[in-house]
Amino acid sequence: MGYRVVVAGATGNVGREMLNILAEREFPADEIVALASSRSAGDTIEYGDTGKMLKIQNIEHFDPTGWDMALFAIGSDATKIHAPRFAAAGCVVIDNSSLYRMDPDVPLIVPEVNPDAIDGYTARNIIANPNCSTAQMVVALKPLHDAAKILRVVVSTYQSVSGAGKEGMDELFEQSRNIFVGDQSEPRKFTKQIAFNVIPHIDKFLEDGSTKEEWKMVVETKKILDPKIKVTATCVRVPVFVGHSESINIEFENELSAQEAQNILREAPGVMLVDKREDGGYVTPVECVGDYATFISRVRDDSTVDNGLNLWCVSDNLRKGAALNAVQIAELLGRRHLKKG
């Protein structure tokens, strides 16, 4: 006996990936329904590569009573309306928006990092999925923190345009094409030209000069991993379609050599260590697309501080940063709390 599963926002980049991953991982769903706005209602969408077509229903009119769990990829405004409605009907919401991440009554989960925290979902019947850049970073940090206790993290991100949705991907494509043919192309989704450029600005600016994306990495890492860890971030949008990269500098309380860190990461859940100190002996965003893993390369000692390391972290942001993590949360929820059969 399987679960009755809702995917809300099924026509977007993340919603489509949720359907693909549920199918790929053979999630035990007896029934699955795809929801979207009224604009898409009545259209059909394929359930992964199964050949099974799902008719998209209007989320406004959908009754969640009797459904076990709902994977939300509909943005904060729509989530504010529908998540409480689904949760009150007994359908556990796994939310990909930022709306509930810092709510003390809502667990913020990366299954490889803090699986026990999911037990707190009963307070609101809602579980939050972290920011894409945070998710891959904490997967890398967790085994190292367990080994030597992290004191401080300095991270610079190189985030793909898919993190800004289909509009971001379209803008990169159109600007790149227009530059080649000599046409004008004004920014619409981004604040400046993204083609052949980098933009040190993701989300809104805050009073202290940081952006909300940088703030998310700080507070979410503390909630997921350890509130005592000091984190500072610089988040940059780069002209890559899919795949976020991060340069991470870590300061530990206890000594941990690069070789010891490599040995730990080689065995860590969710991590794939690719660290050959030679030309091409590292992973780039193009190579991680479509993969489940968080890839770690360039692990090396930082001689400028006591007990310091540097590493390079790459992951498919539509997968581990969003859809895959949500499905892994659903799997964890099923194993621990919603057992069937």
Image (spheres, rainbow, N blue to C red):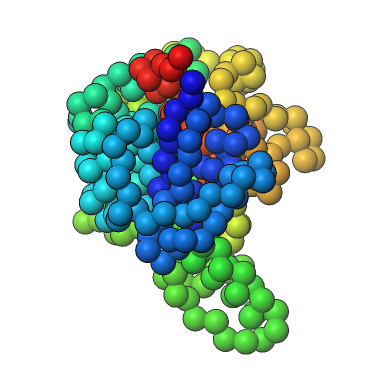
x and y, in percent, of residue 228 in the image = 29, 24
Left or right, residue 272 beside residue 323: right
Q: Quadrant of residue 104?
A: top left
x and y, in percent, of residue 299 in the image = 62, 29
x and y, in percent, of residue 225 in the image = 36, 24
Residue farthest along the right direction in this orientation: 279
Report the residue at 48% width, 39% height from top. 32
Left or right, residue 39 beside residue 99: right
Report the residue at 56% width, 68% height from top. 170
Report the residue at 45% width, 44% height from top. 33
Q: On screen, 30 above or below 217?
A: above
Q: Can residue 262 be seen in this view?
A: yes
Q: In which quarter of the image is residue 114?
A: top left
Report the residue at 71% width, 37% height from top. 282
Q: Quadrant of residue 148?
A: top left
Q: Can residue 127 be seen in this view?
A: no
Q: On screen, 79 above or below 28?
A: below
Q: Which of 183 and 121 is in front in this view?
A: 121
Residue farthest along the bottom direction in this orientation: 183
x and y, in percent, of residue 117 in the image = 32, 20
Q: On screen, 289 above or below 254?
A: below
- The total number of labels drawn is 0
Q: Which of 113 and 276 is in front in this view?
A: 113
Q: On screen, 149 above or below 22?
A: above
